[in-house]
Image: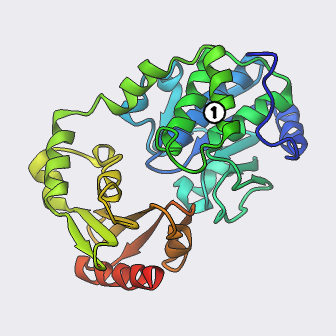
Amino acid sequence: MSAAATPLFSDVAWQPVIDAIERAEHIVLITHCNPDGDGIGAQQALYETLTAAGKQVRMHNRDGVPRIYQFFEHADKVGRGDWGEPGWADLIIALDCGAFGRLGMPEAFFQGARLVNIDHHASNKLFGDVNLVDARYCATGAMIYDLILAMQAPMSASAASAIYAAVMTDTASFRLASATPAVYRMAACLIEAGAEPWPISVNVYESRSLAGMKMMTACLDTLEIKHAGKSAWIYVTDEIYRRTGADVEDTEGLIDYARSIDGVEVAVFIRVDEHDSARWKVSFRGKTWANVGQLAATLGGGGHAYAAGCVLQGAFDDVCAEVEQAVSRTLG
């Protein structure tokens, strides 16, 4: 990495995290259910850094690694589903996860381990034994960048690529207000360290499956405009999954089409849970002034000012009505 590399935020107290890592013999890195680019990128970069430092490290996610992130160098090392070795880890580091339940793992997974919680969601529930939560960061991957600098560890090309992908996806390709000058300077340092923007972009944004394209068409057919043009709504139901042959991974990025409509301030994406037809994942995106993080919080969820979500139970029509009331309050 360039000798000019500097942390995004110099006032962050990384020492408790570094102390926990130094004391640990066996470390497991985990991110949230249905992981996104930020969670996977942060996990991959920290794995690369800690293994290079001689630590015994494993990665495990309830839902593994999405297809579009399989290009990461260590993607094949991420475990999936049940954890077969309770008590192996003495330290578990949760990345990009706002609540303990979102890790999706049984209590036995955490047996005998300290839990470090590293996240950039303001709504984080502070569920770790050590919590480093800072909503100033554009992505958890950017926090790992600062952690690597604080550890005075080298930045490999593999780690740089993972962090670049994390930041790229969580800033909507550097389009959100969270992409500050410091974030662009960090991106430059990552590229100097070996990250290659074009191959990363191709893998993330230009590798959609045919089933995913069919789902996108079916999903956009559900588009509804409400609140005098200020909100746009799209949906994915069981029937759409069956008809297109797509899965939950193919829903990535669909909400951005709703937000892109001129005049829309709040985009809403409601999809059925792939395991429970009475459970609905609701995602929100804000454009300029609407704070969807606060909106999601009123429904038991959380997130950022411009990207947030929640999970609701019930019949589809009842869930839509509850969400519409909340959006109405936000839009005034």
| Residue that badge 1 annotates | 184
Number of numbered discs present? 1
Amino acid residing under circle 1: Tyr
Where is residue 195 drawn, in percent x and y?
Answer: 57, 18
Picture quarter with the N terminus:
top right
Seen in the picture, residue 10 relative to 200 is either above or below; the reply is below
Q: Quadrant of residue 268?
A: bottom left
Where is residue 26 drawn, in percent x and y?
Answer: 74, 32
| Residue 61 in sight in this render | no
Where is residue 298 drawn, in percent x and y?
Answer: 52, 80
Where is residue 123 drawn, in percent x and y?
Answer: 64, 66
Residue at x-position 25% and y-position 46%: 247
Residue at x-position 13% and y-position 59%: 221
The colour scheme applied to this rendered structure is: rainbow
Seen in the picture, residue 107 relative to 113 is either above or below; the reply is below
Secondary structure at badge 1 equals helix
Q: Residue furthest front?
A: 262
85 or 265: nearer the viewer: 265
Left or right of 215 in this view: 202? right
Q: Quadrant of residue 156?
A: top right
Left or right of 286 in this view: 164? right
16 or 103: nearer the viewer: 16
Seen in the picture, residue 248 relative to 154 is either above or below; the reply is below
Residue at x-position 26% and y-position 67%: 277
Residue at x-position 61% and y-position 38%: 85
Picture quarter with the C terminus:
bottom left
- Dot 1, crowdedness within 10 Å: few (<14), some or many (≥20)? few
| Residue 163 in sight in this render | yes
Left or right of 158 in this view: 149? right
Seen in the picture, residue 314 relative to 154 is either above or below; the reply is below
